[in-house]
Image (spheres, rainbow, N blue to C red):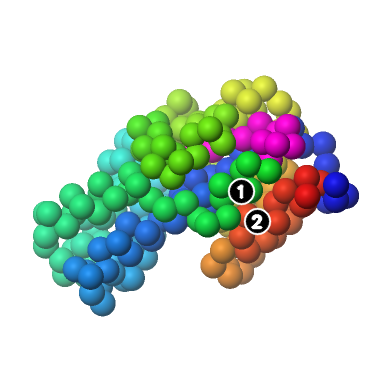
Amino acid sequence: MAEAEISGIRACIFDAYGTLFDVHSAAARCRGDLGDKADSLSNIWRQKQLQYTWLRSLMRSHVDFWQVTGDALDYAMAAVGLDDPAMRQRLMDLYLQLDAYAEVPDMLAALKAGGLQTGVLSNGAPTMLKAAIDSAGLTDLLDHALSVEDVGIFKPDPRVYQLATDRVGVKPGEICFMSSNAWDAYAASHFGFRVVWVNRFGQPPERIPGAPDREIDTLAPLPGLLGLA
């Protein structure tokens, strides 16, 4: 076993979208029809999806992430000049079948073999999470699928992170939390989790409270950081 760089961990909890699942894989599967609009549409879709979660939280006007995802897609399609109800339906359907990043199954298997609890803590609605997890073949590798719907507000509200400690049954400092979203990683650190920021896209550090314990560019090194490799 390698020496653990992050010790005392009893559970590994992951953000879902962008961390375990490639949010751009839906549009990528439609690239043949979307053509040169595929990347712009996908990027705007993701940006507005996140913005709408923050805005709705501030407005105290919560709806589930499926509604937010559809609203964001409507905005993105309008932004790129695309009026195609059939394509909209196809993209929404594909969002329930997002590709997992290539390293995810083996990484989760290593954590489970090391005796750690595993799970997701996500903005996603329960039905969305179940569909994505099942489609990616990760059902047996995740012990928990925790949705913000149980607290009725999106990340980074502290009640979301508290949900993980309550449901998993461990202290905040015994949870290692992974997110590719820098704002999520920093907020989780500020809450009290040990945090590994999965900086898949080469983002600069955030200027908000909190600080990740480690930064990696894929999830492959995670077991080693926890002394499991």
What residue is drawn where x is 40% and y is 34%?
A: 130
Q: Is residue 145 visible?
A: yes
What residue is drawn where x is 57% and y is 29%?
A: 143
Quick one: 125 or 53, which is closer to the camera? 125
| Contact flag, marks 2 and 1 (Cβ < 8 Å) | yes
Where on the picture, by quarter, is residue 40? bottom left
Q: Which mark is residue 220?
A: 2
Which range of residues does the magenta coloring cover?
A: 111-122
Is 74 above or below relative to 56?
below
Identity, as a three-letter code, of the amino acid under mark 1 = Asp
For this orientation, the residue located farthest to the right is: 3
Residue 10 position, x and y percent, is: 74, 32
Residue 223 position, x and y percent, is: 72, 48
Q: Which mark is residue 86?
A: none
Q: Is residue 116 left or right of residue 93?
A: right
Where on the picture, by quarter, is residue 136? top left
Neighbours of disc 2 within 10 Å: few (<14), some (14-19), many (20+): some
Of circles 2 and 1, which is in front?
1
Q: Closer to the N terminus: mark 2 or mark 1?
A: 1
SS for dot 1: helix
Q: Is residue 52 left or right of residue 133?
A: left
